[in-house]
Structures are given as C-alpha cells and as structure tokens.
Image (spheres, helix red, strand yellow):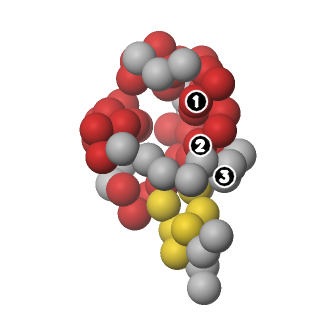
Amino acid sequence: MPIQVELDMVLLKKKMKLTELAASVDITMANLSILKTGKAKAMRFSTLEAVCKALDCQPGDILKYVP
C-alpha cells in the first residue's frame, strides 16, 4: 500500500510511549499497534484527529504517501 504510517517517528520526536498515547486517545493498544506496524487498511478521521491532538502534530506528520 502506498500510504505509510509514520507513527513511530512522531512518537520518538514527542518522547511519548505507545501506552501513553493509547491512554490519552482512548484507543486499545491492539488498534494502535496495528496502525504503528502499517497493517491497518483504514483510519477514521476521528481517530486521526485524536492522535494528532494528543501528539500536537498534523496528519501529514503521521501519514506518508510513497508511490
């Protein structure tokens, strides 16, 4: 899939652990892990909004298009 999730990089920059993000966004660790590993086939805008708000970033910081 040409859309890659760069959640690892944003978490490193913000010095936040996946468990902290899961708690602040109220998403299960399993679902965040699926996003983080790039196995997700879709992402709701509400989830993207919550992740961006928690990490103080833009959607383009998390999602990357690689043809």
Can residue 17 be seen in this snapshot? no
The three-letter amino acid code for the residue at tag 1 is Asn
Dot 2 crowding, Cα within 10 Å, few <14, some 14–19, many 20+? some
Residue position marked by numbered label 1 in the rendering: 31
Quadrant assignment for the C terminus: bottom right
Establish if 17 lies above or below 44.
above
Dot 3 crowding, Cα within 10 Å, few <14, some 14–19, many 20+? some
User: For numbered disc 3, what is the local secondary structure?
Assistant: loop
Establish if 38 lies above or below 33.
below
User: For numbered disc 1, what is the local secondary structure?
Assistant: helix
Describe residue 9's horizontal placement relative to residue 24 as left or right: right
Residue position marked by numbered label 3 in the rendering: 38
- The residue at the point 36 percent across, 56 percent down is 59
Residue 4 at what x, y percent from top left?
60, 63
Distance in Å between CA atoms under marks 1 and 2? 6 Å
The three-letter amino acid code for the residue at tag 3 is Gly
Dot 1 and dot 3 residues touching (CB under 8 Å): no
Label annotation for residue 35 = 2
Can you tell which quarter of the image residue 26 is in?
Answer: top left
- The residue at the point 47 percent across, 14 percent down is 23
Residue 7 at what x, y percent from top left?
57, 47
Dot 2 and dot 3 residues touching (CB under 8 Å): yes
User: For numbered disc 2, what is the local secondary structure?
Assistant: helix
Dot 1 crowding, Cα within 10 Å, few <14, some 14–19, many 20+? few
Can residue 19 be seen in this snapshot? yes
Can you tell which quarter of the image residue 50 is in?
Answer: top left
Which residue is nearer to you in this view: 50 or 17? 50
The three-letter amino acid code for the residue at tag 2 is Leu
Distance in Å between CA atoms under marks 2 and 3? 5 Å
Q: How many marks?
A: 3
Dot 1 and dot 2 residues touching (CB under 8 Å): yes
